[in-house]
Amino acid sequence: MTATGASIHGRTWSGIDTRNRIITSPTPSSVPPKIGDEAASFLMMNRNKRGIALDLKKPGGKRVLERLVPRVDVLIENFSPGTMEKLGFGYAQLKTINPALIYCTLTGFGRTGSRANASPDEGPMPVASSGTATQTSPPNCAPRSVGTTTW
C-alpha cells in the first residue's frame, strides 16, 4: 500500500520486538531468511511503514493513542477478545473520538466460541490447528509455515 502513496503507521505492544519474529523448524529450508539481524519477512511486510511502540497500560501510551485516533482512517488490532475494551480502546469508545473510524479486529479463532481465548494470533497457531500447514506441505514432510502471514 505504501508503494501507492498510503501512509501506514504500525503500532506494536511495548516490549515486544517483532523484527526478528520467525518460526524455527528442524527443517532448515523452512526457516525464513534474514537480512542482517532482521527477518526478511518483517522487512517485506513493513516496507515504508512508520512504527511506534505504545504501552496502553500506562497513561502516556494511552494519551498518544488518543491523539492518533482522530487522525487515522483504520485501526487494526489482534489482541485477545475484550482486551482493547478493558484498556479503554474498544470500538464503542473510539468511535466517540473518530466516528468515521474503521475498526478491524483480527483473532486466530474468532471472538466467540470455545477457542476464542486460545490465541490472539492470526498466524501460525490457527494455521497449525486447522491442518492447513499439513495440507500444504510436501508429502512425507513435517508441516511447514504457509506462505507469508500478514499482521
Image (cartoon, grey):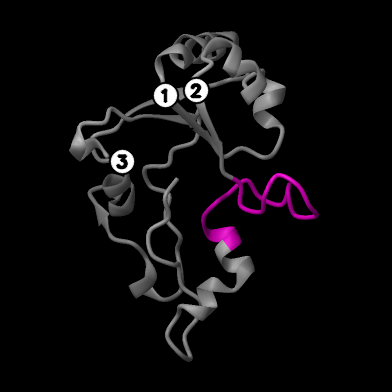
Residue 96 vertical placement versus 3 (above, below): above
Question: Looking at the rendered structure, which numbered label has been put on residue 73?
Answer: 1
Judging from the image, what secondary structure is the residue with disc 2 in? loop
Residue underneath mark 2: 101
Mark 1 closeness class: few <14, some 14–19, many ≥20 residues within 10 Å:
few
Mark 3 closeness class: few <14, some 14–19, many ≥20 residues within 10 Å:
some
Residue underneath mark 3: 46
Image coordinates of residue 53 in percent, x first then y, are 44, 25
Examine the image and state in which quarter residue 49 appears.
top left
Per the model, the C-alpha gap separating discs 2 and 1 is 5 Å
Q: Which residues are magenta?
A: 107-126
In primary-sequence order, the first of circles 3 and 1 is: 3
Q: Is residue 108 magenta?
A: yes
Per the model, the C-alpha gap separating discs 2 and 3 is 22 Å
Q: Main secondary structure of the magenta part?
A: loop
Per the model, the C-alpha gap separating discs 3 and 1 is 18 Å
The answer to whether 32 appears left or right of 18 in the picture is left
Circle nearer the viewer, 2 or 3 = 2
Question: Looking at the rendered structure, which numbered label has been put on residue 84?
Answer: none
Image coordinates of residue 145 in percent, x first then y, are 45, 67
Residue 29 vertical placement versus 8 (above, below): below
Q: Quadrant of the N terminus?
A: top left
